[in-house]
Image (cartoon, helix red, strand yellow):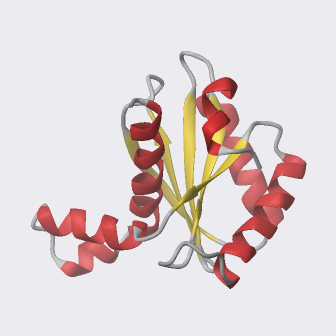
Amino acid sequence: MMDINDIKNHINNKSRLLGVDMGSKRVGLSISDENRKIATPLKTINYENIQILINELEKIINENNVHAIIFGNPKNMDGSEGNSSQSIKDKVKLITEKIKIPVFLWDERLSTVGAFNLTSQLDINVTKRVKNIDEKAAAFILQGVLDFLNN
């Protein structure tokens, strides 16, 4: 895992970023456009084991010119790191041993809440808002990184 402040040193002009909202049962994925302005929900996959996830990530990386992956880091509201954060770090460590592009962590506090609230502003009913919430949360995480890069 690398420091998010170093991300600009690891991406080139026309590369995409992949955002990941890692849950214990589902993993939300999002992808940026090649100019790194907009994060778009990509898909939600059921988490079975780390190797299946790695295989899926490698496939997406190869098909979409992805140059870095951003994993949401679920810190506690006070900024400390609890069990969820440590679990993500453990999984990300295993992933970085297999995937050869830079991997970064991004503070994802309230990303799922943010994604849910954003869809509420679009006047979408609750059932539809909950559907695909993981990939929307991944897009919320990735958009935070894109905004950070473009400021």
24 over 139 or under it: above or below:
below
In the image: residue 66, left or right of residue 143: right
Quick one: 18 or 63, which is closer to the camera?
A: 18
In the image: residue 97, left or right of residue 133: right
> Which of the 4 quarters of the picture holds residue 112?
bottom left
- Residue 45, given in percent of the width and then of the height, sits at 58, 65
10 over 119 or under it: above or below:
above
The residue under the point 39% across, 60% down is 136
Q: Residue furthest bottom?
A: 83
- Residue 126, given in percent of the width and then of the height, sits at 21, 80
Q: Residue furthest right?
A: 97
Quick one: 82 or 131, which is closer to the camera?
A: 82
Q: Residue furthest left?
A: 123
Quarter of the figure with the C terminus: top left
> Which of the 4 quarters of the picture holds residue 127?
bottom left
46 over 59 or under it: above or below:
below
127 over 117 or under it: above or below:
below
In the image: residue 76, left or right of residue 37: right
Q: How many discs appear?
A: 0
- Residue 55, given in percent of the width and then of the height, sits at 77, 52
In the image: residue 147, left or right of residue 68: left
The residue under the point 81% across, 55% down is 95
Q: Residue furthest top?
A: 13
The residue under the point 54% across, 79% down is 76
